[in-house]
Image: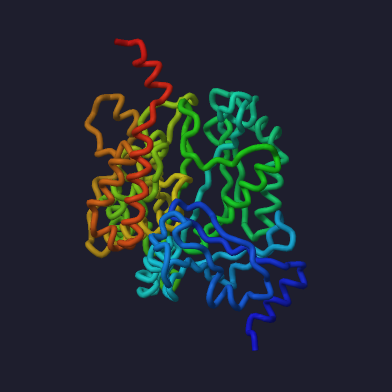
Amino acid sequence: MNRYQPTIERLKSQGIHSVLTQFCDLHGVAKGKLVPIENLKEWVEQGAGFAGPSIAGTGLPRFGARSEYYGRVNVDSLRALPFMPGVAHAVCDGFAGGEALDTCSRQLLKSVLKKIEDRGWTLWVGIEPEFFLLKKGHGGQWQVADAQDQLDKPSYDLKAIHRNAAFLEEMRSTLTELGFELQQIDHEDACGQYEINYKFDDALAAGDRYMLFKMTAHVVAEKHGMVFSCMPKPVASAPGSGLHFHLSITDSEGRAIFSDAAGALGLSAQGHQFAAGLLHHADALSALCAPTVNSYKRLASSNSASGTTWSPVWKAYGDNNRSCVVRTVAGRIEWRLPDPSCNVYAALAGTLAAGLDGMDRAMVPPAPCDEDLYERRASGAAMPARLPRSLEEAVTALEANRALCDAVGAAFCAEFIRLKRAEWDAFSLQVSDWELRRYADAF
C-alpha cells in the first residue's frame, strides 16, 4: 500500500497536480523542477533526479552512480503555492548514490544542528530580510524601481509605502497564505529598500522559510514590473542590505540558555561564550555570511547618503549596539554579519558551529562595547579589529580555519572556496568605470 496516498488525495482535492521540488545550489539560489503529485512516493523515498554537475557546488562527477543529484521531498513541507495554481511547493534534501550529499547546504545545517539536538537543545532563529526593489532603465542600467523614492533620510517613508502599496499588499497576503506570521513591513534606510519581518522559527525551518520568502518576493516583484534584489549594496552612496540572525537556544525544559537577567548584558556565561565564538571565527564566517564581491561594499566604514550607516565593520559586541557585529538584546544574540546574498543554510551552519566552539572551549569575549564605534573612529581612538575588507580576504580566512571548515563540513567548504576564488578572480579581471574615470588620462 502507498502510505503517501492520503497526502496525494488531500492535495489533489485542493486542485494540486504537480510538486515543485525545490532545493538550492551552493550560492543559495533556488533550483528545482515540476513533477506529478501521483508519484509522491518516489519523490520522497528516492527523490527527483537532476544532473549533478549542472548544479553549482555539488562536486559531483559527469558519470557514474554519483553523477545524479536527487532532491528528496520533505512531506511536511508540502504546501500549495498561491502564485502557481495547481502546484505544491516542497523543500528537498540533496542525495547522491543513495547517501546524504555532503555538499548539500541543507544537509550541512542538519548535521551541525544534530550537535545541539544531542544535548537536548533547540536553536531558534529570527531572520530579518532586507531587500531592494530595482528595475533597468532605458540605457540598461540598474536603478531604484520607484523614481520618486529620493529622500535624504528615507527610513519609514510612508509616501513610498503608499506608492508601492500594491506590491506590499500582495506580499502580505501571499506570505500569510503560505503560513508566515508577519510582524512588520517598513521602508528601510536606503531609497528603494524595504524590510519584511516575520516570526522566528527553529533553525532548519527558518532557513526553509527564508528560501520560500525569496521565491515569493521574486514572483510578486516581477508581477509589479520590478526586480526583488538580494544584492547587498546596489547603490554606492546608500546603506546596504543585511540579513540579521536573532539567535537563542532553549534546553529540553524550554529554558533560554543565553539569558540571565543578572548577568552582564543580560546574558548567561554560555551566552557570552557563544558570542566569543562568533567573534573568534568572524573572519572565516565572513566568507559564508557575506559571500560576494559586493558584500564588502556593504561592510565598509563609509558614511551613507542618509547620514547613517549600520554596517557592522568591527569585531565587537555590546548591549543594543548596532555598530557592533554582535548585538545583544533581551537575552538574545543578534548576529549582524550576514547579508541576503548568502546561502542561508550554510550561513546558519557556520554561525552555529562557531558559537558552539566558543561554548565548548569556554571562550572569553573582549570587553563589551558601550559606545558608537563610528564616533570612536572619528575621534581617532584605537579601534577593535575589523572584518575582512574583501571576498578574497574572507575566503583566505575560511580556508585557513580548518577547525571551522571541519565543523561546518569539509567537502562543502572545499567546493565553496573553489567557486569563490574563481568569482574573485573573475572580478579582478574587470575594469570599472571608476578606474577609467580616475586613470584613463591621469598620467
**Is residue 416 among the parts visible in the rendering?**
yes
Compare residues 118 and 262 and report the one nearer the observer. 118
Count of marks placed on residues: 0
Q: Quadrant of the C terminus?
A: top left
| Residue at (73% x, 40% y) in the render | 166
Q: Quadrant of the N terminus?
A: bottom right
Which residue of the protein is positioned furthest toward the bottom in this rendering? 1
Q: Where is residue 70 drawn, in percent x and y?
A: 50, 68
Q: Where is residue 156 drawn, in percent x and y?
A: 59, 34
Residue 360 placement: quadrant? bottom left
Q: Where is residue 413 drawn, in percent x and y?
A: 33, 56
Image height of 336 relative to 187, above or below: below
Image height of 348 relative to 314, above or below: below
Compare residues 424 and 234 and report the one nearer the observer. 424
Q: Where is residue 128 drawn, in percent x and y?
A: 51, 48
Q: How is the image coloured?
A: rainbow
Left or right placement of residue 367 versus residue 248 in this view: left
Which residue of the protein is positioned furthest toward the front in this rendering? 63
Compare residues 3 and 208 and report the one nearer the observer. 3
| Residue at (56% x, 64% y) in the render | 91
**Is residue 262 among the parts visible in the rendering?**
no
Image height of 206 relative to 289, above or below: below
| Residue at (44% x, 44% y) in the render | 339
Left or right placement of residue 97 versus residue 227 in this view: left
